[in-house]
Amino acid sequence: MLFNSLHFFIFAPIVIAVYFALPWRWQRWWLLITSLYFYAAFDPPFTLLLLFSVVVTYVCVYLMQRARRPGLRKAWLWAGIFANLALLYVFKFMDFSFDLWNRILGLEACDPLYAASAGAVLPMGISFFTLQAIGYAIDVYRRDITGEGSVFHFGLFESFFPQLVAGPIMRARDLLYQFEESHRFRFDDFRFGIGLIVAGLFKKTMVADPIGVVIDPVFANPGAYSSGALWGAVYLHALQIYGDFAGYTDVAIGVARIMGFRIPENFRRPFFSLSMTELWGRWHISLSTWLRDYVYIPLGGNRVSVPRTYFNLFITMFVSGVWHGAGLNYILWGLMHATFVIVEKYLGGVAVVRNFFKERVPALFKIAYSFTIFSFALFFFRARPLPDSGSAADSAFFMIDRALSFDGGKSLAIPAGVTLGIAILLLAEAAIERKQDLFDRVWKNDVAFWTISAAIFAYCALIYSSTASAPFVYFQF
C-alpha cells in the first residue's frame, strides 16, 4: 500500500496500537504478518517472490555457516546471491536484455533468433529487498555478523514494512538485533516519529506531487516547449524526486521510530553539497554505502593504484546506473555521475586546483554547480521513449539538444503554491544545515509542532480521501 493513502492512514495506527498492546513474544509475529499484508496490498502474488528471497537466502546462509570447506562456503554464498540476482534479472532486466539482443543482431520479429518481450511486471521493492538479502549473506560470509537462527525473524528483517518497498536498504547489524528487544511506548519516540512523518508527507504531498503536475507535460512532449522550459523542468524534477524519495524514507523512519526501531537516515540535505562527491555521500545513503561496501571495496577501493581506483569508482557508479533501471538512459546517467566523481577526485589531488576551489570559490557557486550537474543528468534519468524520438536514450539526447539550442516554444508556468512549497522546504533545510539551534528551538516548541503536524495530517487526509495518490517515484526501481 502507499504511504500517501487513506489505507495507510488507517493501517499504521492499528498496527502500532496492537503492537504495543501485545506481549513481547508476539510483537514480532504481528510485525511479520502485517508486513506481508502491507506488501500483498500492492499485488498479492508478488508476495511469493518476497518469500522466495527470504527462504532461499536463509537456507543458503544456514548451509554456508555449517560448511567446513572454504570452497563450499563460497558456493553457498554465490547460490544465495545468484537466486536474488535471478529475481532482479527476470523481472527487471530480462526484457531489456532481449531488446539489446535484437538490436545488436539487427533482428526483426520474423527472424528465428528474435527474442520476444516477456512483458514482465516489476514487483514493488524488488530492487531493495534483494539487495538487503545479498548484503546479509555477504556479511555472514565475512563473519561480520552471525546468521539469524530463525527463518521467521530473518523474514521479518527482510520484509519489515516501513522500509520494505523503497528503503532505506537495511544492514542486518543495524536492524536484526532490534527485533530481539522489547519495545514499549515512549512519548519521545512518538513525538520524534510524528515529526519525521509530517516532514515526509510535506515533501511528498506539498512539494513532489504538485511539481509533477507542472513538469509531466514537458517531459511527455518536450518538442513543444522552449529551452528555458526544459531547464526549468529538469531543475524542478531534481526537487521532485528528492521530495518524493526523501519523503518516503522520512515516513518509513518515523513509523519505525514510533514503534521503537532506529533506522538510519537516508538523505542528509544533498542539495547543499559542495561537490558531486559530497552529494553522493548525502543522497540515498543506504544505497551509496551498500555499493561502497559490496562493490567498491571488494574491487580494491582506493587501496590500489590511482588508475585502478578510478576504474573502481567508474564500475561502482555504473552499477548504480544499472540498479536504477533497465535501459541505456540509466547507464548513461550512472556514467555521467561517474565521470564527474572521477574528475573531482583527480583534481582534488592537484594542490593548486584543490586550494583554489577551497579558498577562492564561493560556497554558493559550489552548491549551484553540484545541483546543476545532478539536475542535468536527470535528462537521462527522466527520459522515456517518445513516438518521434525512439528509445529513452534517444529522448534524453533530444531533450538535451533542445535545452542547449535556445529554441522557442511553450513556457513553463509554475503556480504560486508550488513555489511556496519549494521555498518552505529549502528554507527549512537551510535552517537545519546552517542554524540547527534555531530550527530545534522552533520545532521543539509544542504549540508550533502540534499545530503544524495537525494541519499537514488534516490536509493529507483530505487529499488522499478525495483524489488518487501519486505513486512514489522510486517504486519503479
Image (spheres, rainbow, N blue to C red):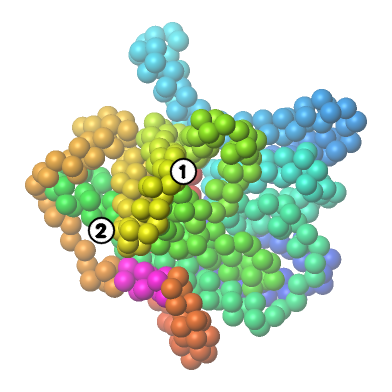
* 135 sits left or right of 329 in the view: right
Q: Percent from the top left, x then y, of residue 380?
A: 34, 40
> For numbered disc 2, what is the local secondary structure?
helix
Residue 214's tag is 2
The Cα atoms of the two marked residues, 2 and 1, are separated by 42 Å
Which residues fall within the magenta stretch?
421-431
Which residue appears at 78% of the width and 29% of the height? Answer: 74
Residue on which the image places disc 1: 349
Q: Percent from the top left, x then y, of residue 160?
A: 66, 57
- Tag 2: residue type? Val
Q: Is residue 160 above or below residue 457?
A: above
Which residue appears at 23% of the width and 40% of the height? Answer: 399
* 130 sits left or right of 21 in the view: left
Q: Please tell me whether residue 401 belongs to the stretch shown in magenta.
A: no
Which residue appears at 51% of the width and 53% of the height? Answer: 281
Q: On the image, which quarter does residue 46 sit in?
A: top right
Q: Please tell me whether residue 429 belongs to the stretch shown in magenta.
A: yes
Specify the farthest residue to the top: 112
